[in-house]
Image (cartoon, rainbow, N blue to C red):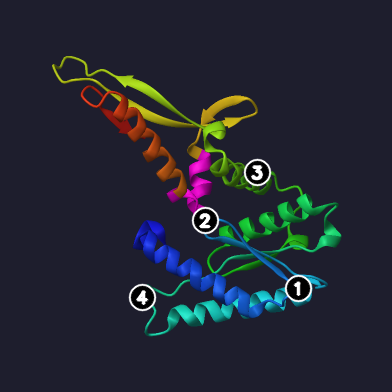
Amino acid sequence: SNSIHGPEMGDMILEKMAEGLGIFCRKKDIVARLGGDTFAILFDDNTEESALKQAEEIQEAFLNMTRASDWPTEPLTLSIGIAESKYARNHGALFQNTMLALNEAKHLGKNRICRYHNLNPHNAMLKKRVEMVSELTTGLHKADKIFKLYKQPIEPLGSSSKGYHEILLRVLKDGTWRTAAHHIDVANDHGLSIDIDLWVTENVVKELLKEPETSVFSVN
C-alpha cells in the first residue's frame, strides 16, 4: 500500500490491521508486527484446526472492513500462513515453518490461507525466500552491517558530458557482498521495500553532502 497510496495511508492500514487482530485474539495470545506489512500471532493452547478457523474469521473481517463505503482505498486481502508447534523442533523452526506457509499463500494468489503440514518440506525455493525475509528483517535493524552501497563510476564515451556514479545496493551473504536483486523481489512481496528505500536514500544523501559541488549519483 505504501508504494501505491503513500506511507500515511500505509500506516493507517497497519493501525487498522493491528486493531482488528487485537479483537480476534485472547489475552493470552501474542500479536506482533514482524516488519513491513507482516504480522504474527502466537496462539496459546490452540490446535491447527482452531487456528485455521480464527484465520478465516480474521481474513473475512478484514476484507469486509476494506469493502466498506468509507474505506479510502480498494478492498484489501490477507495472505496467511499457519504452522503448529508439533511440527517444529524449537521456536525458530516454528517461525520458519509459518513463514514457509505464508510464502506459499502469497504465491498461490490473493486471500489464501496455507498450512505448513500441507507443504512439501523439501521445497528449496520456499526455504530460500524465507531465509531472505529473515535476512532483510534482521538487516533493517542493523542495516550498516548487512547492506552496503557501491559507487560505480560511469563515464560517457565520446561526449563532453560529465561522468557520474551509479549507486548499487549489495547484501552481505555468507561473508560476501552480493547483488540485492533477489532480495528486492522478496522485499516487495513482504512490504519491506519502503524501509530499504529510505535507508538507501539517507545514505546517498550523506555521500552527496560530503562533496555537494561535484557529486552526481544515479541510484539503481
Quadrant (top left/top right/bottom left/bottom right) for the N terminus: bottom left
Density class for disc 3 (Cα within 10 Å; few <14, some 14-19, many ≥20) is some
Q: Which residues are magenta?
A: 182-194
Compared with 125, 65 (above or below) is below
Going by the numbered disc 2, the residue's amino acid type is Gly
Which residue bears the numbered disc 3? 131
Spatial CA span between label 4 and label 1: 33 Å
Crowd tier of the residue under label 1, counting other residues whose Cα lies within 10 Å: few below 14, some 14–19, many 20 or above: few
Q: Nearer the viewer, mark 3 or mark 4?
A: 4
Mark 4: which amino acid?
A: Pro
Residue carrying label 2: 36
Q: Amino acid at mark 1?
A: Lys
**Cα distance between the residues tagged 3 and 1:** 29 Å
Q: Residue at x 40, y 34 (%)?
A: 203
Q: Which residue is mark 1?
A: 28
- Mark 3 residue type: Glu
Cα–Cα span, label 2 and label 4: 20 Å
Q: Residues within 10 Å of mark 4 (few under 14, many from 20)?
A: few
Residue 219 in magenta stretch = no
